[in-house]
């Protein structure tokens, strides 16, 4: 299968995220007004068991996100995404308040998330994520193979993603703490 066919397939699965040039001044005003809720929501999502580790290495610390893949990543992986370029990945911090987040971007993070994105991008389960202290080149190879060259995508993913992955409720733990 050609890279172009793979790109078309991936595009049919990923939630739609507008490009920067498609944002109107009104979109920006609205997103700025909702900034606090947006960041709260993103932090909540990032703390879910399925999102709390970096999607692209074994780091336990995130803080950055990549669109339109909808993954939570660490700062070192975010640098690689940025280095590869915005035609492949747009990176934004979600816990500093530096970036304005738009509703379609937040929805993409909710619908994709690390578990689902890794199901989509890494079909070969023998591929291991680089270690948390991997060097630039190890990290770059993994990230380019995954998102740019689409080397191991899962062609059996359902065509349209409409619901977030279910995370187990914390009820049991809360009950234990309560008792
Ligand atoms: Zn990482």
Image (cartoon, rainbow, N blue to C red):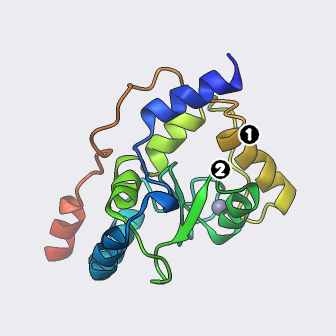
| Side of 160 relative to 1 (left or right) | left
Image quadrant where one finds the N terminus: top right
Tell me where residue 105 appears, x and y as whole percent: 40, 58
Above or below, 169 against 5 in this view is below
Q: Quadrant of ligand 1?
A: bottom right
Q: Which mark is residue 145?
A: 1
Alpha carbon distance from label 1 to label 2: 15 Å
Secondary structure category for the residue under label 2: loop
* Number of residues whose C-alpha sits closer than 10 Å to that of mark 2, classed few (under 14), some (14–19) or many (20 or more): few
Left or right, residue 33 beside residue 146: left
| Mark seen at residue 87 | 2
Q: Residue at x 41, y 63 (%)?
A: 23
Q: Nearer the viewer, residue 65 or 105?
A: 105
Please state the horizontal and vertical placement of residue 157, each as a whole percent of the image: 44, 26
Pinpoint residue 101: horizontal percent, then vertical percent: 40, 70
Residue at image coords 42%, 65%: 46
Identify the mark nearer the N-term, 1 or 2: 2
Please tell me which residue lies in front, 122 or 103: 103
Which residue lies at the image location 74% right of the left edge and 45% below the top edge?
144
């Amino acid at each position: 299968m050609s890279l172009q066919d793979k790109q078309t397939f991936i595009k049919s699965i990923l939630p739609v995220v507008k490009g920067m040039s498609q944002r109107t001044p009104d979109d920006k005003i609205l997103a700025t007004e909702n900034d606090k809720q947006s960041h709260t929501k993103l932090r909540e999502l990032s703390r879910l068991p399925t999102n709390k580790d970096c999607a692209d290495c074994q780091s336990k610390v995130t803080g950055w996100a990549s669109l339109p893949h909808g993954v939570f990543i660490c700062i070192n992986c975010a640098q690689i995404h940025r280095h590869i370029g915005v035609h492949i990945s747009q990176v934004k911090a979600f816990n500093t308040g530096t970036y304005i987040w738009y509703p379609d971007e937040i929805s993409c993070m909710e619908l994709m998330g690390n578990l689902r994105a890794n199901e989509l991008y890494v079909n070969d389960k023998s591929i291991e994520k680089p270690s948390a202290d991997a060097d630039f080149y190890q990290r770059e190879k993994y990230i380019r193979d995954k998102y740019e060259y689409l080397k191991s995508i899962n062609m059996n993913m359902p065509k349209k993603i409409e619901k977030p992955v279910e995370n187990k409720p914390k009820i049991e733990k809360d009950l234990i703490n309560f008792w």
